[in-house]
Amino acid sequence: MTANITICIGTVGSGAWTSEDGGACWRRVGRGVGNESRVYGVAVHPREPRTVFLGADDGLYKSLDGGRSFEHIDSPMNRMDVWKIAFDPRDPDTVFAGTRPAALFRSHDGGRSWRKLPVDMVEECPNVGVPRVTALAVDPADSRVVWAGVEVDGVRRSLDGGETWTRITGGLSDPDIHDVAVRASGNSRTVWTSTPREIFASLDTGESWQGLGVSQQFSLPYCRGLAVKSDDPDTVFVATGDGAAGTTGAIQRSTDGGKSWRQLPLPDRPNSPIWAFATHTADPGLVLACSHYGELYASDNAGDSWSKLPREFTEIRSLVWTPN
């Protein structure tokens, strides 16, 4: 595990934390974000690694120093929970944000101003009550294509950079969406979405979906986060566990675009489902993962082996890493 990175995590009820030495030492963010804040989403600018956006229970925050300090961004989301943030990789001044209650917003000026996008979403749903945007992804090869997943209200797709949206249904039988990831290789595209007991794949920009049958392949079939290796789009990671508030978790990896899977060896039994991943193009082999209840794991060889970081936290909803 390299020490020359900064890790930033968002917790539920104890704010944001950073480590500037790869996880050896930690400190709570002391400027901008409250010590008892609920932080749901963290995202790193794709070209400016010291610029970090953070979504919390009172809107959006921005850091220009790698997460040491944040400033609150005045926006229409000030009274909303911001769960997801995604940059347009080709034009990083374009930023998307997803909230609870479920809504989508877009900025064209790096977060200074925001517009609510015209997306029809339900106000109430089973299981979680108030729906929330749990997935946001911009196609890395065609930024006109934007994906949003809602828990529990299905997948939305835009083909014009967010101006208009369509609810995707063909073959996607479970509306309880946990994450979305896009594989772009040459002219080929695969979109994956994770649900509580299945991963669905689409090869035609969401017009049709096929379940991969992972509940028959994974020892722990509850699926949360997805991550695609930046230099190898055939390698995808899935965070799994035994339930939403379960007692253990595991990481599955495919190196053939989802055709086959291998459960990766963790150094000990996680205390709850694995929840989310952090990757960065600066080192495609360096992958971080968190459990629902505050454990952190790191791999410097794209998942072949893992170490557990010594510090544990309250519930973690998101994490990122950036080069120092």
Image (tube, grey):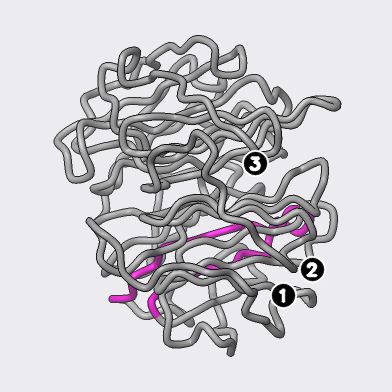
* 72 vs 284: above or below: below
Between circles 3 and 1, the one closer to the viewer is 1
Residue under the point 65% across and 66% down: 96
Q: CA distance from mark 3 to mark 2?
A: 18 Å
Asked if marks 3 and 1 touch (Cβ < 8 Å), the reply is: no
Asked if marks 1 and 2 touch (Cβ < 8 Å), the reply is: yes
Q: Secondary structure at mark 2?
A: loop
In this orientation, which residue lies closer to the viewer: 33 or 185? 185
Q: Label 2: few (<14), some or many (≥20) within 10 Å? A: some
* 21 vs 182: above or below: below
* Residue under label 2: 93
- In this rendering, would 144 be left or right of 254? right
Instruction: Specify the amino acid type for callout 2.
Output: Asp
Residue under the point 61% across and 21% down: 235
Residue under the point 63% across and 50% down: 137
* Residue under label 3: 280
* Residue under label 1: 107
